[in-house]
Amino acid sequence: MPATFRVGLLGHGTVGAAFAALLEQRADAIAATTGLRPELAGVLTRSRGDFAEILDGSDLVVELIGGIEPAREHVLAAMRAGRHVVSANKMLLAQHGEELWGTAREHGVQLRFEGAVAGVVPIIRVLQESLAAAHVERIHGIVNGTTNFILSEMERTGAPYADALAQAQALGYAEADPTDDVTGRDAAAKMAILARLAFSTPVHLDQVPYEGIEHITADDMAYARELGLALKLVGSAERVDGGISVRVHPAFLYAGHPLASIGGPFNAVTVESAAITEITMSGPGAGGPQTASAVLGDVISAMIPPASTPETTASLPIVEDVRSSFYLHLEVADRPGVLAQVCELLGLQGASVKSVVQKGLGENARLVMVVHPLPESRFFAAVRLIGRLDFVRATPRAIRVIEEEFV
Amino acid sequence: MPATFRVGLLGHGTVGAAFAALLEQRADAIAATTGLRPELAGVLTRSRGDFAEILDGSDLVVELIGGIEPAREHVLAAMRAGRHVVSANKMLLAQHGEELWGTAREHGVQLRFEGAVAGVVPIIRVLQESLAAAHVERIHGIVNGTTNFILSEMERTGAPYADALAQAQALGYAEADPTDDVTGRDAAAKMAILARLAFSTPVHLDQVPYEGIEHITADDMAYARELGLALKLVGSAERVDGGISVRVHPAFLYAGHPLASIGGPFNAVTVESAAITEITMSGPGAGGPQTASAVLGDVISAMIPPASTPETTASLPIVEDVRSSFYLHLEVADRPGVLAQVCELLGLQGASVKSVVQKGLGENARLVMVVHPLPESRFFAAVRLIGRLDFVRATPRAIRVIEEEFV
């Protein structure tokens, strides 16, 4: 039986509850990889639990209380007691980061905070590790999912700001009091953290000017489209004239910009540097399970050095015949009943047509269709039969189609 | 003076030369962060250098020879001698990965290979570390920049495959012998590596069926547009019925798919899992400096555990007045000379107009323009003056515009 790694949990709100559930669900897999089985050693909420007791029984403390106090006090106490800490608290890090990082260094413990910025998008790790060699020039980020959802809705429906906000609240993308999100303050805190890491210079939330989206009109959106622009709440952190500038404001992006196509409650961050040109990372910005996943990733990293020499812990068979949607391109004689016969042969193999385009070409016609997913062997069996029909004028052409499953 | 960390370099082609240059350029900054100054201890090429000597004088060996032998033999020898190894050799890892990882584990050394897949896109680290907690369900990747460039060209210009390939060769995106790229074999090797990491199960290049893009026609592209699809060479690795499927083939992506908008020589990878929904990462796929940057990131990671408690190594001033492009929205009386006066006031502050849309609204007109970048203070000074003009009917509205600078 693997040894136990005890995790003390501070806070049991949306993210805290999701973290506790995920930890239990993934404990066996983590034990298989790391040799240590993580286990919840105690939970502190406003009404139950004792901090000193939880600290005493933990190897690592996860702080998901939010806000400044008592989160700050608990995080400092945990690190002073020699515990690694994982936090998703952007406001705390953006305002007391130097004190916290200093304490971590002083006591030789880790302070990890991937969940504080951009949900599951691993921008913290990438900035700290992958880009340790790069001289980062500039970061642009869509780091607040609430405002990105509201702007996407305004663009999609032409709705005014107030209606799109109400819609975001109804869907759970905005809180009852959305002030920190819509004013840009939440994004400013996240940009302060990213700038701090990218430029290795202290950056406090107070040094990040921010503007929100409350004054954006549907009209701006309409003109934006006309000019080929997408309107987003953009956080910028860049080197300027030997100094840096960090700020958050609504901004138009040209259609080719990697952030222009980021819609709905997604987050995305683009990092630019001469050595790497640019990297863009995107994913769901918030949500309990997503942030919990980022937090758990940090916990595992703190448990054990990363396995750069991965062991195989599974021995999975390679499946040959997978399901796929297909594009099918046929040159056929232009006569009645052709489409019906093609569809019948497809149908016999379980393939149903999703969309079809037919074009006359003199005596012939071109039939281009997309079929819904089916096992590839069955699709190709149908295509072989179709290829033998007397009205088919050229070898059928088939290309797989990948559907978006999550968004 | 910081201690020296000696890096032995095997191979001095495009990536090797770029790595040597980048290492020298970033050595001081790396020393400031890690306390160790990396230094080239020797270079092995076909015509010069002695492997045993270089190995002897190195703390870490970087393998950028490519191909199977002598790369495999050197990597194994280096690890057996207790050296960490960083390699960007996808063919070696996709065919001899288990032997190499096993040797690394046996000798307690690190084998890092971020540069082997998707250039600067840090997908290896993210899979191994950030997503260690996630049960990965599926990966879709555009992991070959050459073929993505060719397909983008075919789509953009309507050119046939042969012409787009010639264009790619002329621009240095395709080699004189492009076989490994256009047949999908290069992408298959990369997908074997990603699948191995994502599913912790052995995956060999021989188990990855692949199809290339040689038979794609301009015609397919035209229909794709009509159907709202983008054609890409897609690598897929997914869990299927208790096993896995890993393969590479041309595939259509619906417009909303995060990979659909990846154009030119870029790479991108989307990872899906219930816990994280999905993450997409994109960036330049290849090129000497980009791969060299990924390799150097690995070297730094191997030099020292990641600084999860970052020190401030700089103390940069916060710059208040930065340059920006702007969108300006004016409601004005519809009479002659209005646009000229607005442009004059802008011009006095150094603002020049990039594009303008004017619309009549009865007696009034709406003037929407985008101006080229200028210091914000100067732009806002112009806007204040414009707001006082007698023909201006409402407070001017200004929103920043972010231009794509790299692509």
Image (cartoon, coloured by chain):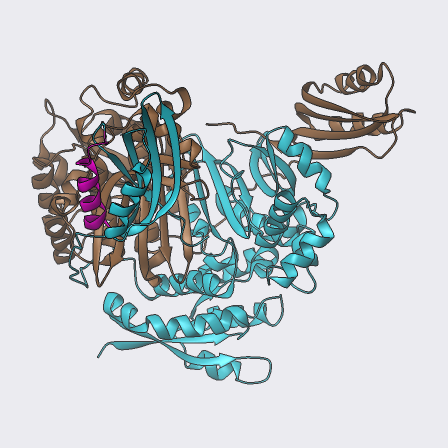
Chain colours: A brown, B cyan
Q: Residue at x 61, y 54 (%)?
A: B146
Front-most of residues B94 and B296: B296
In the image, is residue A3 above or below residue B167?
above
Quadrant of the image occupied by residue A398: top right
Q: Is residue A301 left or right of residue B382?
A: right
Residue A233 percent across, percent down from the top left = 29, 36
Check residue B377 for magenta coloring. Answer: yes
Q: Quadrant of the N terminus of chain A?
A: top left
Residue B113 percent across, percent down from the top left = 47, 59
Q: Residue at x 10, y 22 (%)?
A: A47
The dominant secondary structure in magenta is helix
Q: Residue at x 30, y 54 (%)?
A: A128
Q: Residue at x 69, y 18 (%)?
A: A352
**Bounds of the magenta segment:** B375-392
Check residue B278 for magenta coloring. Answer: no
Residue A44 percent across, percent down from the top left = 14, 29
Residue B91 percent across, percent down from the top left = 60, 59
Q: Is residue B116 left or right of residue A59?
A: right
Quadrant of the image occupied by residue A5: top left
Q: Is residue B232 left or right of residue A267?
A: right
Kindly tell me whether residue A87 is visible in this rendering.
no
Front-most of residues B245 and B190: B190
In the image, is residue B209 above or below residue A242?
above
Quadrant of the image occupied by residue A148: top left
How many marks the image carries: the answer is: 0
